[in-house]
C-alpha cells in the first residue's frame, strides 16, 4: 500500500457551521476522487496545529489570545454537508475529529480517526471555534496547519458502494 501525506493551512477567521450567526466559510476540499470505485483511500493520521509563521509570540496556542476560552474543532469528512455540523461520532460522513483548547500548547489536544472507513470520493475539512465561557460559536483567529496521512486501499464494488451508502445515512 502506498502512503501519501496531504498538508496545508486553514486560514484564520474560519467557521463552517451553519445557523450560528457568523459568516459561513467555504469547506476546504481535498480532491481524491479518481473515478475508479475500486481504488480508494484510508486515513492513517489526522493532526492540526497552529501555523507557527503567524504566532506572533504565542507559538503553540490555537488562538491569538491566551485569555481566550475557545476550543478549536476540526472535522475530516467524506461529504461537504458534514462540515456544516459540529463534530459528532454518529455522523458517518465525519471520519476524523480534532479538538484543542486555546490555552493549551500543541501537545495538549485530542485527535481521532475512525479506523473503519473508506474514502471513495473526496475529503472535506470543517472548522470552528467554541467559546467555553458562554457556549457561543466563534471563528478561528489564527491559521491552522493540517496534516493527513493516507494510504491506497483497494476495495470491491460492493464495499465501495456500501461505504457511499453509509456516508449518506446515520448510525450505521
Image (cartoon, rainbow, N blue to C red):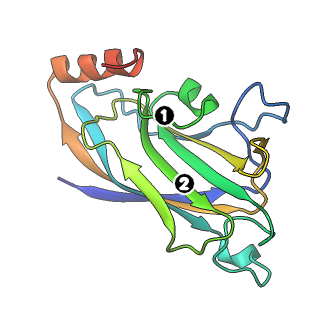
The quadrant of the rendering that contains the C terminus is top left
Residue lying at 75% horizontally and 63% vertically, measured from the top left: 142
Q: For label 1, count other residues whose C-alpha is less than 10 Å away and answer few (under 14), some (14-19) or many (20+).
A: some
Q: Position of residue 24 (x, y in %)?
A: 78, 33
Quarter residue 155 falls in: top left
Q: Which residue is mark 2?
A: 99
Residue lying at 70% horizontally and 47% vertically, measured from the top left: 130
72 sits to left or right of 91: right
Query: Tag 1's secondary structure?
Result: loop
Q: Position of residue 115 (x, y in %)?
A: 26, 44
Q: For label 2, count other residues whose C-alpha is less than 10 Å away and answer few (under 14), some (14-19) or many (20+).
A: many
- The mark nearer the N terminus, 2 or 1, is 1
Q: Position of residue 132 (x, y in %)?
A: 71, 51
Residue with the most extreme bottom position: 57
Q: Which residue is mark 1?
A: 88
Query: Tag 2's secondary structure?
Result: strand
Quarter residue 10 falls in: bottom right
Amino acid at each position: 500500500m502506498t502512503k501519501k501525506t496531504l498538508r496545508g493551512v486553514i486560514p484564520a477567521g474560519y467557521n463552517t457551521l451553519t445557523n450560528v450567526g457568523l459568516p459561513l466559510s467555504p469547506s476546504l476540499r481535498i480532491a481524491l476522487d479518481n473515478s475508479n470505485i475500486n481504488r480508494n483511500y484510508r486515513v492513517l493520521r489526522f493532526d492540526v496545529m497552529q501555523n507557527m509563521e503567524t504566532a506572533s509570540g504565542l507559538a503553540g496556542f490555537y488562538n491569538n489570545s491566551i485569555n481566550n476560552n475557545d476550543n478549536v474543532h476540526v472535522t475530516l469528512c467524506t461529504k461537504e454537508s458534514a462540515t456544516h455540523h459540529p463534530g459528532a461520532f454518529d455522523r458517518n460522513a465525519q471520519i476524523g475529529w480534532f479538538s484543542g483548547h486555546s490555552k493549551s500548547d500543541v501537545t495538549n489536544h485530542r485527535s481521532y480517526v475512525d479506523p473503519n472507513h473508506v474514502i471513495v470520493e473526496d475529503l472535506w475539512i470543517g472548522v470552528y471555534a467554541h467559546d467555553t465561557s458562554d457556549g457561543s460559536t466563534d471563528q478561528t483567529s489564527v491559521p491552522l496547519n493540517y496534516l493527513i496521512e493516507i494510504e491506497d486501499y483497494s476495495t470491491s464494488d460492493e464495499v465501495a458502494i456500501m461505504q457511499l451508502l453509509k456516508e449518506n445515512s446515520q448510525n450505521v
